[in-house]
Image (cartoon, rainbow, N blue to C red):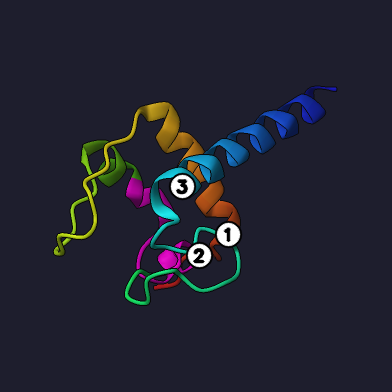
């Protein structure tokens, strides 16, 4: 029963992460496990682990994601939102390889 409750909590967290990314990022980035980004230059989120471990994104998500182009607004997420985003990204990203 405890394991089932933990799985349900994980599933809820993953779903919350997908919802957050869909609401804030999907107009440009693919936030799904498959498919192209709406904006060609916007990398699909399932490829993030090709550049760095997903866990290292926590600080950037908390302090604000800033990019070198004006089209992307700055996002700052709460600790609970960050946990949910990372849970979802870990589902759609293969483990990081150096």
Q: Earlier in the sequence, mark 2 or mark 1?
A: 2
Residue contact between numbered discs 2 and 1, judged by CB atoms under 8 Å: yes
Residue on which the image places disc 1: 92
Query: In the shown orientation, is residue 87 left or right of residue 3?
Result: left
Residue on which the image places disc 2: 46
Is 53 a magenta residue? yes
- Disc 3 versus disc 2: distance between alpha carbons? 12 Å
- Disc 1 versus disc 3: distance between alpha carbons? 12 Å
Question: Which stretch appears magenta?
Answer: 44-57
How far across and how far down the image is residue 79, in percent?
A: 37, 28
Query: In the shown orientation, is residue 96 left or right of residue 73?
Result: right
Give the crowd class for mark 1: few <14, some 14-19, many >=20 residues within 10 Å: some
- Disc 2 versus disc 1: distance between alpha carbons? 5 Å
Residue at position x 60%, y 64% from top?
33
Give the crowd class for mark 2: few <14, some 14-19, many >=20 residues within 10 Å: many
Can you say whether 83 is above or below 25 in the image? Answer: above
Residue on which the image places disc 3: 21
Residue contact between numbered discs 1 and 3, judged by CB atoms under 8 Å: no
SS for callout 1: helix
């Amino acid at each position: 029963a405890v394991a089932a409750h933990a799985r349900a909590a994980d599933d809820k967290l993953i779903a919350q992460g997908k919802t957050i990314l869909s609401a804030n990022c999907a107009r440009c980035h693919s936030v799904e496990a498959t498919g192209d980004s709406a904006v060609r230059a916007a990398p699909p989120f399932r490829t993030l682990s090709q550049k760095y471990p997903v866990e290292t994104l926590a600080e950037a998500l908390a302090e604000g994601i800033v990019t070198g182009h004006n089209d992307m607004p700055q996002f700052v997420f709460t600790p609970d939102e960050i946990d949910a985003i990372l849970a979802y990204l870990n589902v759609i990203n293969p483990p990081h390889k150096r």
